[in-house]
Image (cartoon, coloured by chain):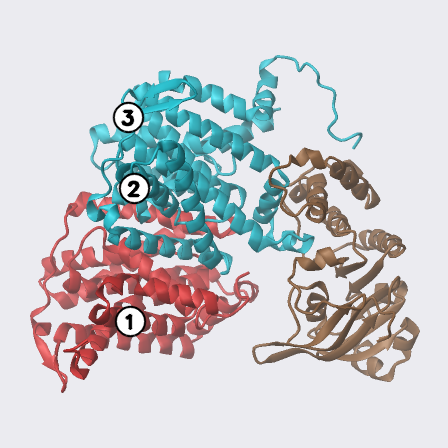
Amino acid sequence: MTAEALIETRGVTRRFGGFTALKDVSVGIRPGVLTSIIGPNGAGKSTFFNLLSGAFAPSEGRVFFQGRDITGLRAHEFAHVGIAKSFQITNLFPNFTALENVRIALQAHVSRYGLWRCRSALAGLADEAATLLESVGLADHARRLARELAHGQQRALEIAVALAARPKLLLMDEPTAGMSPEETKVMMVLIRKLVEQRTVVLVEHKMKMVMGISERIVVLHHGELLAEGTPDDIRNDEMVKRVYLGQGQH
Amino acid sequence: MDGITPQLLALQVFTGLALGAIYVLLAVGLSLIFGMLTVVNFAHGAFFMLGAYVGLFAAEQTGSFWAALVIAPLAVAAVGMLCERWLIRPLYGRGIDYPLLLTFGLAYMMVEGIRIVFGKAGLPFETPELLQGATNLGFADFPTYRLFVIGVVALLLVVLWLLIERTSFGLIVRAGARDPVIVRVLGIDVSRVWLIVFGVGTGIAALAGVLAAPLQGVSPEMGSSVLIVAFVITVVGGMGSLVGAVVAGLLVGVVESLAVLFVPEAAKVSMFVIMAAVLLVRPQGLFGRAGLMA
Amino acid sequence: MKSATASLRLSPPLTWAALPGLIARHRVLATIAFFAVFPWLMPYQSLAINILIYGLYAVGFNLLFGYTGLLSFGHAAFLGVGAYTAGILIGQHGAAWWWAIPVAIAVGCLVALAMGLLAIRTRGIYFAMVTLALSQCVYFLVYQLPASGGENGLRGVNVSEVSLFGLHLNLLDPMHKYYFVFGFVALAMAVLSRILASPFGGAIEAVRENEARARACGFDIERTKLLSFVLSAGFCALAGALNAIHLSSVPIETLDYATSGLVVMLCLLGGMGTYFGPFVGAALFLLIQDLASAWTEHWQLYVGAVFVLFVLFFPKGVWGTLLERIRHDR
């Protein structure tokens, strides 16, 4: 929790009815660095992810982004502030083409209501969308409907849509879920490329991938912060070893 | 405001409870169906009406109101199950609006079907002899039949509660209501559960119809006005919450009856005022869960 | 994608195959042209007028349901409010049609704003129920209003002639009345086309396709839905006002549940989310009603059955299925 954190949570707690999913978690994510959030099932990773992405607000505590208090901002404002996410279960516009998926995401940024202008007047958006598709390797599939794409392609499209928000912070919830080893490798290359221009935070299960790719790791357990540091720090951390790594590696 | 004695108030409250009891039955059936099948049953009023007519027919054929009280819910539940299996089930994957639309079309057909068979005009339904007249409640005389209605509904609610809280079937219903996906994953034959729940839900609606028949007669239109009330109650109580259905149903019934005493013109609109207030303050309903059913 | 959509089709080949594309690009003109000759295709003009009016009602509803994905069962409220406002202004206060109609639209939009603020706060599944309940509330309120005529409805909405920019229409002549209504419908369709082609048009479809995704992209879902709700009501209120003038009266049934249900049927039968589909739905319904009621009192049973069949097997409606076939074959 230093002044240079891009996004940071201070003492966030999140309750759902009687159940406390997160308890007093204070973490800072450093800019320009790939951070992974790991922890056993039920550790609170999804809840934490949702807090960072604005799906809901913490029950207690505050969230800061670039020094600004964004606690309680409405969900759709997060995209405008510079935080974008890709969902764990592919969440696209199924009957739009791949190009239109990205184009509409770009549009959300550029125009609030634009009732009277013509959509094609925002012509530059289609070109920019095409470029984004190229950057995730989907240039050839621009005209295909999102629901007709293969799983790996849909995940890539999901990322392109997230990138359309021109985010400073990109949150990715298990980006390699359901992927074959080959597809996972391709995704990892893509993620490494993405880190060059923005901060990326992953929630992941696959330990090997996490250790191989992350520069910093945050470990959650039973809703509390267990450890935080570089992969080496984590590998050597006694608590972590006992609780998580001791349960067997992927 | 003179002439409004405590006795009168109490009497109106009881009237409200009787009215509310019918509403509660409807709302409970609706909530059950929604909770388990995620279907907003726009034909619920039509099943209520069907129950009333089947009850009328059965009472005429057998000469017994009591027989009608048993036959109608069972017969209508059977119809309901057929509808679920062949008309609604094919639509589950298609998104939340399609089953709703289908039930709406179904209701349309059912109402017209009844008009064909029984005619467009309303028909009277005699209160059974045993339940005619009034009973002395201590502070006033109250129509016996209405007491009977309150009694039957209370009994049914207890039975339902036991079923849901104490049996394994009830466990499935509760689990399904909370997370339909989990139930499927556990390998339970969900389609059988859907069938039964829809049958139970429509059967309860039909029972409500038979109970309501002596109070208001039967008519093809009786379903649509009651459907709206059932929706209001569900919104106020919280979708999928049986406790909510009970509380809201009684609340709406009592408020409407009291409004008749004090501000008669507003009586019919009173339930909407309650609904609007709940929507403003607690949009998920009094007992609904926030964030459920995104 | 090379240079996006800047394909240089200066003179498209005029083959039959190119026709659908041509029509789609100039849908406003095509619609206007079609309806300009429409009365001659129909057995009698009042059927044509009804198709226009019910079609417009369905067009308004379609903006909310077909394009934005929100199923409302309370749209009769807007049809009715538009009808009663215009009716009361014209029939009881001697208002001129050219300002009574816009006021009717505005009042419809205001009612929608109030209803929408309550209905949109709830989760999606509640929406159908809440809108139904709220519109029933409107029904009761209007029923009790002395000016509305209660059970008997509103009478005496008489507009017998219309003069505009030197053009003189005698509304007692069905043909003239048709073109009077047609003028408004043409205008409405032009406005609709602009709305759909605007960025807002893209936003509402995004909400329909995947609300959570749209929110994550940065769209203000609640505001978008509310705006769509209000705009949709405007079209319906216009249809109501025109109907009041057409019938010279407003029956109280305009506001009831059956009327809300009717527009849902029209929209589904015609084709949700299509530009022209609502008119097809209206025509289909009115023609079935016309034909079937000739030999049976119980035509509603058949309409209901057709609707159920469509929900099960033809959810895209007549026009929607047709469009899909055409796109597929291209």
Left or right: B98, with A122 as reference point? left
- Asked if the residue under mark 3 is in contact with the one under mark 2, i.e. CB atoms within 8 Å, the reply is no
Residue at 23%, 35% (x, y): give it. C156
Q: Position of residue C270 (x, y in %)?
A: 44, 34
Left or right: A34, with B192 as reference point? right
- Asked if the residue under mark 1 is in contact with the one under mark 2, i.e. CB atoms within 8 Å, the reply is no
* Alpha carbons under labels 2 and 1: distance apart: 33 Å
Query: Image quadrant for the C terminus of chain C?
Result: top right
Under circle 1, the secondary element is helix
Mark nearer the viewer, 2 or 1: 2
Under circle 3, the secondary element is loop
- Image quadrant assignment for residue C215: bottom right
Residue at 58%, 18% (x, y): give it. C19
Disc 2 and disc 1 on one polypeptide chain: no
Pointer 3 indicates a residue of which chain?
Answer: C
Query: Image quadrant for the N terminus of chain C?
Result: top right
First of labels 2, 3 by sequence position = 2
- The picture's colour for chain C is cyan
Query: Which label number is shown at residue C160?
Result: 3
Q: Which residue is mark 2?
A: C88
Regarding residue C309, the answer to whether it shows in the image is no
Pointer 1 indicates a residue of which chain?
Answer: B
Q: Which residue is mark 1?
A: B255
**Which amino acid, mark 2?**
Ile
- Up the image or down, B21 lies above or below C253; here it is below
Chain letter for the brown colouring in the rendering = A
Callout 1 crowding tier (Cα within 10 Å): few <14, some 14–19, many ≥20: many
Callout 3 crowding tier (Cα within 10 Å): few <14, some 14–19, many ≥20: few
Q: Position of residue A82 (x, y in %)?
A: 76, 57
Residue at 21%, 50% (x, y): give it. B220
Residue at 39%, 45% (x, y): give it. C78
Pointer 2 indicates a residue of which chain?
Answer: C
